[in-house]
Amino acid sequence: GINHLFLSIEGFAKGFISPYWMTFRQAKAFDAMIRKDETATPVVYYGVAGKHGDGDDAAGGPGQEDGDVYRFLKGYSVFNADQIDGLPERFYPTEADLDTGARPIAEFEAFFARLPVPIRTGFDKAAYREATDDIVMPDVSRFEEASRFYAVALHEMGHATGVGL
């Protein structure tokens, strides 16, 4: 989970559009090239291995004692697809490509319509705007699932209460 957080922050800070990240070797497998002067972002891999090289399946297997396994972290450097030339087009989404197929759910729409803070869609981020006392959200079709849209809307509604701001 920490990699997702770090990569989301890095992607937002650098203005990347693509949600795809890969190592130098993964890019090379597509015959793609990292652009000159681009810098990598570190990520970590957590694993469990047997003392005799049994791999991830060694942990918790029948007859395995805790002393027979060890845990490790391994660092990798990854690049966002926006830093790489020559990848297939699917790695470079456009605004139109971001329709996941998620659609509004009538029951949730009715619930949010009864709340005092209006929700406005069509924005590039989710936020509560204190100055206008409203919530701005991307369209529901930009979320992987409609339930995630409503979860974020409810989170923003929490900010509208003024508690914990």
Image (cartoon, helix red, strand yellow):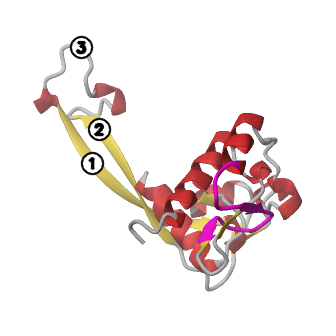
Q: Residues within 10 Å of mark 2 (few under 14, many from 20)?
A: some
Residue identified by numbered label 2 = 48
Q: Nearer the viewer, residue 159 or 38?
A: 159
- Residue receiving disc 1: 72
Which one is in front, 56 or 107? 107
Q: Residues within 10 Å of mark 3 (few under 14, many from 20)?
A: few
- Compared with 102, 143 (above or below) is below
Q: Is residue 3 left or right of residue 34?
A: left
13 is higher (above) or lower (below) than 114: below
* Residue 50 visible here: yes
Query: Magenta region: which residues?
Result: 114-128
Kindly identify the amino acid type of the residue bearing the numbered disc 1: Phe
Q: How far, Cα to Cα, is label 3 from label 1?
A: 21 Å
Does residue 116 lie above or below 72 as drawn?
below
In screen coordinates, is 72 left or right of 25? left
Name the quadrant of the C terminus: bottom left
The earlier-in-sequence mark between 3 and 1 is: 3
**Residue placed at 34% from the left, 33% from the top?**
55
